[in-house]
Amino acid sequence: MARGKDEGVRKVKAAQTRAALLDAARTLFGERGYLNTKVTDITSAAGRATGSFYEHFADKQELLQALLGDLEDAADERLAAVEHPKDHDLTDRAQLREHLAIAWSVMREHRAIQVALFQSMVADDPASGRAWRDMTGQTGMLREHLEWLREQGRPLPGEPELIAAGMGAMLALTSYALPPGGPYSDEQVVDAFTDLLLKGLAG
Amino acid sequence: MARGKDEGVRKVKAAQTRAALLDAARTLFGERGYLNTKVTDITSAAGRATGSFYEHFADKQELLQALLGDLEDAADERLAAVEHPKDHDLTDRAQLREHLAIAWSVMREHRAIQVALFQSMVADDPASGRAWRDMTGQTGMLREHLEWLREQGRPLPGEPELIAAGMGAMLALTSYALPPGGPYSDEQVVDAFTDLLLKGLAG
DNA sequence: GTCTATATACCGATAGAC
DNA sequence: GTCTATCGGTATATAGAC
């Protein structure tokens, strides 16, 4: 069955190329960002030819979608490792801190992807509404927890969707802007935002 | 003095062209964003030739700097209209709300410029550190108020610079993402963020 | 599937006439 | 100062050989 074997070999090689492209893209996105990374940068870093890229991805955006899958998998894995019922009480310091810590560490450990997604989102036509859609989508779980709190009769500062988006904005933009190895440790950031969001400035 | 008169006329025409370019750019930045607006888009919208652009600005970035001046003037004007000593007490609801309301309304009234600045910041090389520099710079006043609070022995959630940047991130990214005429009114946003930042989720 | 080579398109920026 | 015309550089995507 030489034919079957050849097909298998070809498949493996293709998978290797695809993986090499994803890996190179991830490194470059982290170094110079998504917008400043050209398709030819990715292929040459991966040791492949330009034309090969389009055998695996329609364009740079589609490659980013594949990387996004990795990010979501990582987040799901982290969330699965802890209890996360809908009735999490975000007014409990430990529970709020855990949420923020998970979100923050996922963003930091996959900073290249987060940077790329952020740049891709902001580069889009602002009138398209994509930014708001992305933000509310990514903070959906937070919103559910807040809605649960509201159903318990607890007073909230505002609409759950808006509060969740605001919290997400704080984390995401701070993570984007704060240089790795910068002046603040991960613990400092998570603790500061936990206390700010838990009790506010007057707490 | 025909010569002097000619020079005066030329000066006026030049100022008109410059103003037309700035005006067209502002409109286009609001409609399709900074990154998707080309220099030729600006000149044709202003009814001028491509070459004229470079008589007034070295490039698109320099034009944006000129627009930034307008934004800062607007912010200074708004701040001058109210009392704003360094010892503002941000743990007082009315004072915190006023700060947030001014920041929010300036961003919304000059949304085109804010969008452009945001896109310009995010499009830069993430490793350049510009994003963090911009954010700490734009929240410098907030940081000073927080430092004053700390000197009074009031407990803060974390380092003033970090807290100020986090608050600024929440406002800036929410303003960027939230579509004009969207689901939330300006009052709703300001009230929600005021209460969230003042007393937090547990307040 | 991967490669080399290239078509295509676009944009920033400038030269030179008026 | 403003215009028309254009050069030069660059990025995307494809064609065709292997």
Image (cartoon, coloured by chain):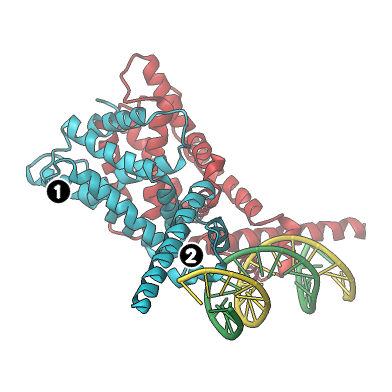
Chain colours: A red, B cyan, C green, D yellow
SS category of the residue bearing label 2 = helix
Placement of the C terminus of chain B among the 4 image quadrants: top left
Placement of the N terminus of chain B among the 4 image quadrants: bottom left
The label number, if any, that marks residue A141 in the structure image: none
The label number, if any, that marks residue A31 in the structure image: 2
Q: Is residue B75 left or right of residue A159?
A: left
Same-chain status of marks 2 and 1: no
Nearer the observer: mark 2 or 1; the answer is: 1
**Viewer-nearest residue: A85 or B18:** B18
Estimate the spatial distance between the alpha carbons at disc 2 and disc 1, rounded to whole Å. 34 Å
Structural crowding at the residue carrying mark 1, measured as other residues with C-alpha within 10 Å and reported as few (<14), some (14–19) or many (≥20): some
Identified at 65% across, 58% down, the residue is A19
Q: Quadrant of residue A158?
A: top left
Q: Are marks 2 and 1 in contact (CB under 8 Å)?
A: no
The spot of residue A170 in percent (x, y) is 36, 42
Q: Is residue B58 left or right of residue B167?
A: right
The spot of residue B173 in percent (x, y) is 41, 44
Structural crowding at the residue carrying mark 2, measured as other residues with C-alpha within 10 Å and reported as few (<14), some (14–19) or many (≥20): some
The label number, if any, that marks residue B147 in the structure image: 1
Q: Chain of mark 2?
A: A
Q: Amino acid at mark 1?
A: Glu
Identified at 36% across, 36% down, the residue is A98
The spot of residue A186 in percent (x, y) is 33, 50
Residue B22 seen: yes
Height in image: C16 above or below A129?
Answer: below
**Viewer-nearest residue: B113 or B70:** B70
Q: Residue furthest left?
A: B152
Q: Chain of mark 1?
A: B
Q: Quadrant of residue A92?
A: top left
Residue A190 seen: no
SS category of the residue bearing label 1 = helix
Identified at 51% across, 51% down, the residue is B28
